[in-house]
Image (spheres, rainbow, N blue to C red):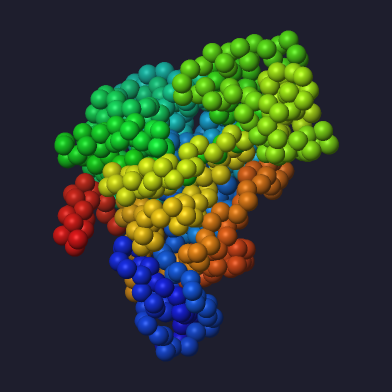
Amino acid sequence: MSLDLAIRGGTVIDGTGAPGQPADVGIAGGRIAEISPRLSDTAVRTIDAQGLVVAPGFVDIHTHLDAAVLWDDTLSPSPLHGVTTVIGGNCGFTVAPITPEARDYLLAMLARVEGMPAESLATGLNWDWGTTAEYLDRTDRPLAANAGFLVGHSAIRRTVMGERSSEAATAADVEAMAGQLRAGLTAGGLGFSTSTSNTHHDGDGRPVPSRAASRDEIIALCRAVQGTAAPVVEISPGVEGFDPELAELMADMSLAADRPLNWNPVIVDAATEAGGWDRLRMSDAAAERGAEVLALTIPLAITARHCLATPSVLAALPGWEDPMALPHHERRELLADPVRRQELDRSARSVKMRLSHLADWGAYVIGEGFSLQTKPLEGRTVGDVASERGVSPWDALCDIAVDDDLRTVLVSSANGADRADWEARARFWTDDRVVMGASDAGAHLDQLDFFTYTTGSLAASRQFGLLSLEEHVRQLTDVPARLYGLAGRGRIAEGWHADLVVFDPDTVAPGPVHTRYDLPADAGRLYGEAVGVASVIVNGAEVVTNGQFTDARPGHLLRSGRDTEPVTLTTRRSTHNSQRGAL
């Protein structure tokens, strides 16, 4: 048999957790045709994997690439980090279904809550769809990676209720929303997503539509998932610690949908590990009732970047919602005024506990400057510049940002980067109640580089000896793929789709992160390549080679039913029991 592609001489880690084995992998027709100690068949193309690992492509189940998929067919930079499948539409924030009235509202909401540049959304999308089915048809085009999408609560609610979407829904409203959801799932949506997080606000600073939903409405929508092929429900609850009411809600959602529920995020380091375990009690409470509730964890030390041009996170500070929602030029004028900006400082410093670090102005490092005045300040702390200028850190920060037309990138120090912090994270990575992920790719484009979570966690695991490579690969591949029922993906097995990543286990890591102005309307975003990723293969075609994208676009839209296997609470229990029996 003639092969399209042969990967020779590597160590195959198949995604199941089994020990890696030296083997060649032969690919034909987009699928894995043979796994052998030595392939005898000829191939159109051969990849030399001597000294490298051949693993299933990484599966990223928490992105916000719903808009970007329509202007960037590479879904960059995620595939550069070994990701071959992405899932968008999380937290209830989707661009479909939509009506002409809802369009401007949803655009402003996405800009505010997910940090997507409004100018890119306005110019990069033609908004020529209405239903979720029409949106999925628009995204069903050649891509560098496979992509699937959830159906979002806030979009459904705004489409059905219009300007009443901040009010309680009537029975007729709920039935109409359930109809929209069922239609979207029948068209191929992978599940229902929602948010109750008190940090999620729309473009006017008000709670997003899903936060106005009653408990009964949420349960009714989860019930609408039954009878469809959609594999999951997802929620962003936005709370800290164990909340009995939330635990009951999430268990009820899982039972109503007869699906596993995924919530996000749980973020831990050595100092917060105990609180993380406390939050996982919500999974235990659900399991006692026959439900399945899984937490999604960000497996990185958090280095946040902030920018006053798109201050979606800083807007969460008390008294900042309205000022940060001002048009750009008015916000710049406010921050340039030595008197008016002091009220913002006083309000910000009144915050306690969770957000207090955001107002520690002197601790920020100037990550990137874009003017003649600010470029030389890169790498210095705001506090250092303030002392040099004889002003307060807040005044120094405002002056720096104003000189840069608010574009200055302000970097907080990495949160929890010591061995003890990484060891705490690793204990969560392998817990059955937790899934690794939460890249947020496509969102918070000027602030977060979580798109490096695959290469970043592998590098940390190597440095601190956290997990075996086989188990780490399983957590990045088979675990999320089985949660989403992705048929024939997440493992290296004969007959399965040839989604693969070839990497150097001794060097794999994220490369430097920088700002790149390549979005529609020339808006900027954080971007970074990977180190040690030799090749990324999607459906049998190489999309990344030696750290760069090729011209191949073999990825396609994943639709529930067509591209997924049935996922119910019963099938999940059966899978868990069979895995335990194999141990």
Residue drawn 27% across and 54% down?
Answer: 566
Q: Looking at the image, is 326 positioned above or below residue 99?
A: above
Q: Looking at the image, is 535 positioned above or below residue 293?
A: below
Q: Looking at the image, is 226 positioned above or below residue 168?
A: below
Examine the image and state in which quarter residue 445 appears: top right
Residue drawn 52% across and 45% down?
Answer: 450
Residue 302 location in percent, x, y?
A: 51, 39
Residue 71 visible: yes
Is 540 left or right of 235, judged from the image as shown? Answer: right
Quarter of the rendering occupied by the C terminus: bottom left
Quarter of the rendering occupied by the N terminus: bottom left
Residue 485 visible: no
Work out whether residue 190 or residue 522 is closer to the camera in this orientation and state it.
Answer: 522
Is 201 left or right of 384, judged from the image as shown? Answer: left
Residue 505 location in percent, x, y?
A: 47, 64
Count of number-bearing discs: 0
Residue drawn 63% across and 51% down?
Answer: 512
Residue 317 location in percent, x, y?
A: 55, 20
Residue drawn 62% across and 35% down?
Answer: 411
Residue 7 location in percent, x, y?
A: 47, 77
